[in-house]
Image: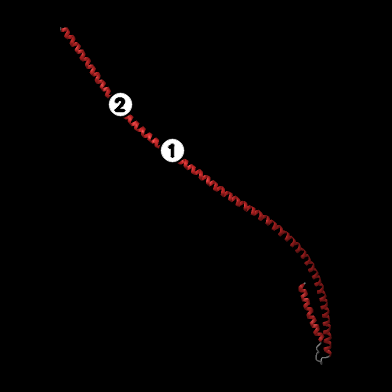
């Protein structure tokens, strides 16, 4: 009977000990579960933060992509406008260049025509100047011959007039000598007027005038 009780107590004691061990294991498991729960909560919170951050970055990326597409569209439209503007400006510049080139060509043609006309005028003027120079040389030669002939004639006339004047002076001197002799013979008679003397004086005056004029001309 006592052995049975001892065995029973031993068995109860063992059961109690096992129960305490199981309770201790359960408590330790609860602690581990609680720790794992807290760690899971931390991880879940981190996951939520990471999700929120990823969502924010994803939204930012979407916004940036939209802005990039909008900018690309704007750039494409701007490039199209620039190309159209460049084509239009090229057409305008080409048209202006053609106009300026045509004006320059017209000016060159006019200048060429003017140069040709000027060359013809210069040739005509040169021909006329050559003709006038030949006529001038001919007239100058003829004039020199006429002047030479006139000078010779004037010299001859001057020589003849001087000889004639010498003869007249001799005649006048002779007449004065004769008059002086007559005056001495007829002092008591009044002097008479001689028409020949008057004509001689007129002749002498005319000869003096002719001599002066001939000397001046020569």
The residue lying at 17 percent from left, 9 percent from top is 6
Front-most of 37 and 201? 37
Q: Is residue 133 above or below residue 190?
A: above
In the rendered image, the quadrant that contains the C terminus is bottom right
Q: Which mark is in front, 2 or 1?
A: 1
Q: 10 Å neighbourhood of mark 1: few (<14), some, or many (≥20)?
A: few
The residue lying at 30 percent from left, 26 percent from top is 40
- Rounded to the nearest angstrom, the CA distance separating label 2 from label 1 is 42 Å
At numbered mark 2, what does the secondary structure look like: helix, strand or loop? helix
- Among all residues in the image, which is located at the extreme bottom? 188
Name which of mark 2 and mark 1 comes first in the sequence.
Answer: 2
Front-most of 163 and 54? 54
Tell me: 101 left or right of 41: right
The residue lying at 38 percent from left, 34 percent from top is 58
In the rendered image, residue 125, in percent from the top left (x then y), is placed at 71, 60
Q: Is residue 45 above or below residue 173?
A: above
In the rendered image, residue 2, in percent from the top left (x then y), is placed at 15, 7
The numbered dot on residue 147 is none
The numbered dot on residue 69 is 1
In the rendered image, the quadrant that contains the N terminus is top left
Front-most of 156 and 140? 140
Q: Is residue 76 above or below residue 34?
A: below
Front-most of 146 and 152? 146
Q: 10 Å neighbourhood of mark 2: few (<14), some, or many (≥20)?
A: few
Tell me: 144 left or right of 96: right
Q: Which residue is mark 2?
A: 40
In the rendered image, residue 208, in percent from the top left (x then y), is placed at 78, 78
The residue lying at 58 percent from left, 49 percent from top is 98
Tell me: 78 left or right of 31: right
Quadrant of the rendered image containing residue 172: bottom right
């Amino acid at each position: 009977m006592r052995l049975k009780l001892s065995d029973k107590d031993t068995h109860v004691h063992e059961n109690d000990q096992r129960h305490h061990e199981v309770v201790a294991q359960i408590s330790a498991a609860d602690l581990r579960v609680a720790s794992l729960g807290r760690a899971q909560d931390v991880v879940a919170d981190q996951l939520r933060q990471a999700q929120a951050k990823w969502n924010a970055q994803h939204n930012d990326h979407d916004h940036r992509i939209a802005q990039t597409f909008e900018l690309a569209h704007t750039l494409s439209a701007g490039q199209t406008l620039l190309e159209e503007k460049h084509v239009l400006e090229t057409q305008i510049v080409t048209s202006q260049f053609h106009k300026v080139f045509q004006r320059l060509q017209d000016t060159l043609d006019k200048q060429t025509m003017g140069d040709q006309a000027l060359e013809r005028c210069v040739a005509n003027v040169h021909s006329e100047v050559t003709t006038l120079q030949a006529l001038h040389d001919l007239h100058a030669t003829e004039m020199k011959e006429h002047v030479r002939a006139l000078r010779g004639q004037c010299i001859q006339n001057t020589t003849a007039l001087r000889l004639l004047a010498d003869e007249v002076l001799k005649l006048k001197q002779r007449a004065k000598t004769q008059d002086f002799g007559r005056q001495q013979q007829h002092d008591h008679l009044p002097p008479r007027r001689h028409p020949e003397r008057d004509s001689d004086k007129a002749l002498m005056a005319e000869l003096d005038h002719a001599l002066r004029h001939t000397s001046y001309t020569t």
